[in-house]
Image: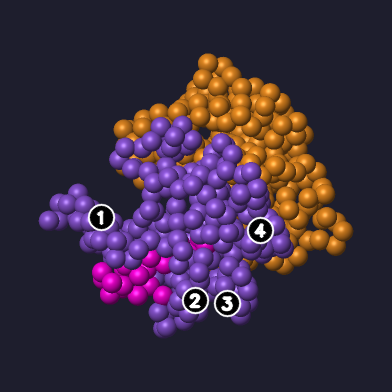
Chain colours: A purple, B orange
Amino acid sequence: MAGGGDELKLLGMWASPFVLRVKLALSFKGLSYEYVEEDLRNKSGLLLSSNPVHKKVPVLIHNGKPVCEPQVIVQYLDEVYSATGPSFLPVDPYERAMARFWASFIDEKFMASWLKAGRGKTEEERAEGLKLTFAAVETLEGAFKECSKGKPFFGGDSVGYLDIALGTLVAWMHTAEVRHGLRLFDASRSPLLEKWVERFGKLDEVVAVLPDIDRFVEHAKMREAEVAAAAGNN
Amino acid sequence: MAGGGDELKLLGMWASPFVLRVKLALSFKGLSYEYVEEDLRNKSGLLLSSNPVHKKVPVLIHNGKPVCEPQVIVQYLDEVYSATGPSFLPVDPYERAMARFWASFIDEKFMASWLKAGRGKTEEERAEGLKLTFAAVETLEGAFKECSKGKPFFGGDSVGYLDIALGTLVAWMHTAEVRHGLRLFDASRSPLLEKWVERFGKLDEVVAVLPDIDRFVEHAKMREAEVAAAAGNN
């Protein structure tokens, strides 16, 4: 485990939900690491040489060897540090398959729809994005029921792969509420997820790595202005 | 293992590369299963109830429990039947991470670019797709070198996760050559992959599940005509 001769370095960007996913995984595993903030408009030589294919954060460098792509990194950490902290993926192959299935859904349907809702080029595209987002929330409510089996987390009694995959959006959800009065998980549409997100957001391991909400709201405001300017709306 | 009381059923469509991925995995593991061909214009109740989220093939039903999404299914088979046939994913966590990284690249970059090359709406879009496809091939040539370490397959001495992920395209590559004289893996651009694809295509486990090439070429011709008609090009 880290500290026992292992060197972990994370190349990230503070406001990226994909980087936060790795920070959450490291936090739950109780691993210490060096964090390097990247300027994405002027990427470092280390980032470009560590992830020549995508040139994106997050990159985790473990004893000099880079691992890229958030879900790949989380599974890597889970396998290398299997004896440390909670196991993110369940032991049972069928439950593992379900966790992987829903993690893909979170990225490919839920997050993609939400991005469209926020950054769609036309009013129509954004409205369609929001509709798909709410449909995805309802599907995820069912997924939570199925995976948690009445326990507090997707992973059961402790956080797992899906808690990290979805929980990475806590700050974004909060920002959507502050900025647009948009409550993604609410009592009528998704009562289980509403409770889950509160529970998850209060965990010490989460609080330790969540970005500062005020700074995050300011950042979101700036990004929205950029998107609006690019779309010629202001 | 299947036969020892296990019941495996695969819902598929003969020309789908994603279904072929699962057929290859089953073939390499030496598992017997019931195959159900789906009519995608009139999906069965079993498909809709087994994959209510995406309503897509492939779906593997194992003792009545459905597993969806090709890469999820291949990992599931690898974990459930770990004692049968080759292990698709390596044992070493770093090598596992690399395999997962490149599998995502194959789906998100290589296959996506190739689809764009074939089905882009404009001439310009298709040309851009082809350019990206060739760039992806060069990247994959490097991946093969890295993963195979001088051995015959991505998985080393036996086929692994990436051989299945990329090998699923053997019939498509052949069709592109027959239909358009397009040789995706050739000696100048990707000498290692050129040899790999020949080697892979001759394996008994592959020959046993590959679609009939003539039928496939006819199918591709029909699909291309449909795409052209939709684009108003004929």
| Quadrant where the C terminus of chain A is found in the figure | bottom left
- Tell me the residue that label 4 is attached to: A84
Position of B190 compared to B92: left or right?
A: left
Chain at numbered mark 2: A
| Residue at mark 2 to residue at mark 1: CA–CA distance | 29 Å
Which dot, 1 or 4, sits closer to the camera?
Answer: 4
Q: Residue furthest right?
A: B4
Q: Amino acid at mark 4?
A: Thr
The image shows residue A193, relative to residue B102, as above or below, that is below
Q: Is residue A126 visible?
A: no
User: For the residues marked 4 and 2, what is the alpha-carbon distance in whole angstroms?
Assistant: 22 Å
Which residue is disc 1 drawn over?
A223
Identity of the residue drawn at 37% across and 68% down:
A173
Which label sits on residue A199?
A: 2
In the rendered structure, which disc, 1 or 3, sits on the residue that comes first in sequence?
3
User: Same chain for the residues at labels 3 and 4, yes or no?
Assistant: yes
